Structures are given as C-alpha cells and as structure tokens.
Image (spheres, grey):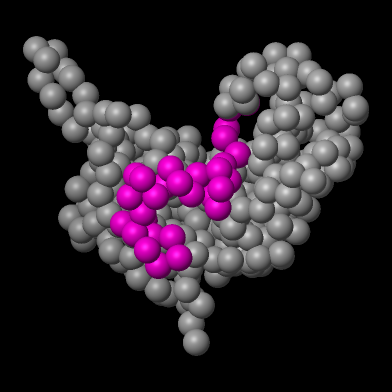
Amino acid sequence: MKKEPILSVKDLGVSFSQYTKGLRRRDLKVITNLDVDLYEGEILAVVGSSGSGKSLLAHAILGILPDNSSTEGTITYNGKALDQRVKEKLRGDEIAFIPQSVNFLDPLMQVSKQVKICIDDKQEADKRQRKIFNKYGLNKKVDSLYPFELSGGMARKVLLSTALVSDCKVIIADEPTPGLDEKSLNEVLDDFRNVANSGCAVLMITHDIESALKIADKIAVFYAGTTLEVASASDFMDDGKKLRHPYSKALYNALPQNGFKPIKGSQPMPNELPKGCLFQDRCEKVSEKCRETRPDSKFVRDGMVRCLYAT
C-alpha cells in the first residue's frame, strides 16, 4: 500500500495586492504551481536562492501570510484540506514552526517559560526544558533571562528548543541554523534526524545545502516561486549525475567541494517572469519550445521535475 503524505501542497499560488501610481491596484504573483509532499518519518529540505518562495511556502501552510495576500491551490493535512480556521488550530499544536527571525520570541516572557509552554506533559516540562538547554550549552542562568538579554546564537538555540521539545507531528524550520557554532549546528541536525526517526515529519528550509544533505531524505529545489525538482538526497552524490533539472545540477556544481562553478544570469523577478520555462535564460540547453511552454511536473526516475527534456 502506497504511503500517503501527512502534509501535501498542490499547485500552490500566492499573490500580493499592490497599488501603483494613480492608486491602480495590481496583483503580483510570487508563487506559481508549487508542489511538495511531506511524509512522517522523513526530512524534506527546501533549497533555492533568496526570493524563490521558500519562506512563503511555510507561511502559507501556517496561515500567517499578510492581509494583502491571496492563495490558490490546495494544502492538505492527513488527507483533509486546510482552511484558515484549521491552520490556526494546528499551529503550535500538531504543526510546530521554527521561524527565521528570533524576533518571534516573546520579549516579555522568560525564555525557559517559552519552551515549557510547548511541552504537553507539564509534569515533565521543567526536566525536558533544562535537558535541551544543557544540550545546547545554555546554563541555568539562562532560564530567567528575557530574549533581549541573549546573544543571537543563544536566541536561535531557544527558538529551536521550543519546537524540538514539543510533541508535534510536523516541524517547519525556516533557516534554523544561522549563527550556530559547528558543535551546536551538528547537534541541531542530529536532533532533527532523531525527531524524524521517531515519526515526526520535518520541513527544513535552508540555504545551507551541505547541512541539508547530511540529514535530509529528499531535497526540493525551488526557483522563481515554483518547484523545479524533488529528488532523493542521494541524487546529489556521484557528480550529481542522477539529478534531473539543469538548475539542480548547477546548485550541485556551485558547492565549494564541487568546484564552486557559477552560472550566468540571475533568478527572474516576480513581475518579469518569462512565458515559458522559468530557467530558460540561464540554461545551456534552452530551445524555442522552452521559451514558449511552461513545463508541467512529471515523474522521472523516482523524482519530480519540471523540465521538457528531463529523462
């Protein structure tokens, strides 16, 4: 029997209303036809350059997009479509969020209390909070501190703790590792792997492909507001020969250990998207058909890809 995803995003579109000169309203679409599936016991790492839609995906799932936004497509959890009311109910309960900014910490609450409220078993709250603080090098004195009294790295560790001590079924982590020393980074990655092994589903949004490849089961490659490829992490090994999309291969070749090879051009802005393939101006294999046709997603060698010529 085929395993079903606990969280599924299909054909997601996100637009923002803007007002130009003369108070003319326009809708700027920043995400188009975005697809991801998240499974229990797995880590899906979402990678791509800034502006590719990674954080907006997290905000759409959680229902925390700004008021001037609109969405289309479907997001399902355990097979049921999510509306705003259900998103708010699940948020912080069954779906935990590790935001990119440490400003999400409550400035008026001691950090130890912020971690404890995420623990369902209140009798174990003190013990579990202190255990994870000890693991990340946060001594007893930190318990009574407020966010403004923490260094950036300490605040990041507190944010991570709020999600990793919870009993949630899904963790969405938006750039969870910046500012961490190497020891803490490896401990956090190990914790993500351990919670996934215990049955939790983890969506890890990151620029750090190298760290993602250490623990992820699958890698979703985002570009200009859509998903270009979803591949097994193992496909990024062996010179990247198993990767299906030219952009995924370019990301692989840009890693320091793989030659740090750049490619021409840059990701198009949302108001300048081409008619056909979004990657066309940077692809060495572009054809006239690529310029005219926006590729649909298809499955090639057990992975999803949007490329007319992927085999």
Image coordinates of residue 210 in percent, x first then y, are 68, 49
Residue 116 colored magenta?
no
Which percent across, then down, holds residue 285? 36, 58
Which residue is located at x 60 percent, y 39 percent?
98
Q: Taking the image as drawn, is residue 133 in sight?
A: yes
Of 5 and 180, nearer the camera is: 5
Q: Residue at x 81, y 47 (%)?
A: 124
Q: Is 60 drawn above or below residue 155 in the view shown?
A: below
Q: Can residue 35 be seen here?
A: no
* Image side of residue 70 versus residue 208, left or right: left
Q: Is residue 183 above or below residue 247?
A: above
At x 47%, y 39%, the residue is 55
Task: Quadrant for residue 266, please give it.
Answer: top left
Outermost residue on the bottom side: it is: 1
Instruction: Please tell me which residue is depicted at 30% across the width and 29% down the height of the picture.
Output: 67
Which x, y percent locates residue 116? 73, 37
> Which range of residues does the magenta coloring cover?
74-102
User: Where is residue 205, by image quadrant?
Assistant: top right
Relative horizontal placement of residue 291, taking residue 102 as reference (left or right): left
Q: Quick check: 180 above or below 106?
A: below
Quick one: 212 or 256, which is closer to the camera?
Answer: 212
Quadrant location, the C terminus: bottom left
Left or right: residue 211 versus residue 49 is right
Is 88 colored magenta in this rendering?
yes
- Number of marks: 0
| Rendering coords of residue 122 (x, y %) | 74, 44
In the picture as drawn, the residue positioned furthest to the front comes out as 123
